[in-house]
Image: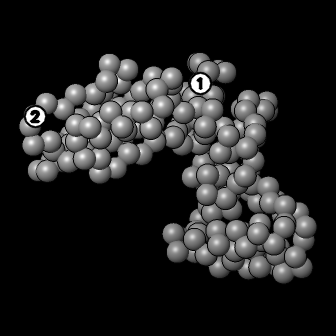
Amino acid sequence: MQQKVQFIITVIHEPALLIFDEPFSGFDPVNANLLKQEILELKQAGHTIIFSTHNMSSVEEICDEIALINRSEVVLSGNVAAIRDQFKNHTFTLTIRTPERNTFSLPETITTLSRKEKPGSITLKIRKAGSVSNSSLLTEIGKQAEILSFTEELPSMNDIFIHTVSATNPQQI
């Protein structure tokens, strides 16, 4: 309750700049979601909001810009969507209807990372060469089987944080 009261006191005067340190810490999921919705409304109203947090899922949901800091140094900064795009590795999840004839094969430019078969469908985790367009890949696959879904797997900010910190300080655990 004390955290809720502190939040209300903080935002009641509608300050232009709000700084939160681990804003969702200590809240149950229902209250954390309520707080998140209030913060998003403040953001939409034009308030500048700064988070200091280790909760990367909150960063992905709320933040437009990020600065990752490790040992007092900014190791990565920029637009969240652009950073996630920068770290993508051309990995996709593809689900097809099980072909009637068992002759389905992927082009040579595709690496199969995993394969799961269920009655009526096959789900593949694949990595494609960056030079292969999604359209040409789907056209080729569509000639052999019905495509049920095709989703790009972008790295999470948590994965990016771990990768970046590990790269800048390999001995850190």
Q: Amino acid at mark 2?
A: Asn
Q: Quadrant of the N terminus?
A: bottom right
The label number, if any, that marks residue 74 in the structure image: none
Disc 2 versus disc 1: nearer the observer: 2
The label number, if any, that marks residue 102 in the structure image: 2
- In the rendered image, residue 66, in percent from the top left (x then y), is placed at 73, 44
Query: CB under 8 Å between callouts 2 and 1?
Result: no
Q: Nearer the viewer, residue 12 or 148?
A: 148
- In the rendered image, residue 71, in percent from the top left (x then y), is placed at 74, 30
Q: Residue furthest left?
A: 101
Residue drawn at the location 57% of the way across and 52% of the way down: 57
Q: Nearer the viewer, residue 58 or 152?
A: 152
Q: Amino acid at mark 1?
A: Ser
The answer to whether 18 is drawn above or below residue 11 in the figure is above
Q: Nearer the viewer, residue 140 or 102?
A: 140
Mark 1 lies on a secondary structure that is: helix
Sequence-earlier tag: 2 or 1: 2
Mark 2 lies on a secondary structure that is: loop
The answer to whether 60 is drawn above or below residue 152 in the figure is below
Badge 2 local density, few (<14 within 10 Å), some, or many (20+)?
few
Find residue 103 and report its image quarter. top left
Horizontal side of 43 relative to 26 (left or right) equals right
Viewer can see residue 111: no
The residue that disc 1 covers is 166
Horizontal side of 58 relative to 143 (left or right) equals right
Badge 1 local density, few (<14 within 10 Å), some, or many (20+)?
some
Q: Quadrant of the C terminus?
A: top right
Residue drawn at the location 9% of the way across and 43% of the way down: 100
The answer to whether 19 is drawn above or below residue 105 in the figure is below
Find residue 74 and report its image quarter. top right
Residue drawn at the location 51% of the way across and 24% of the way down: 130
- In the rendered image, residue 91, in percent from the top left (x then y), is placed at 43, 33
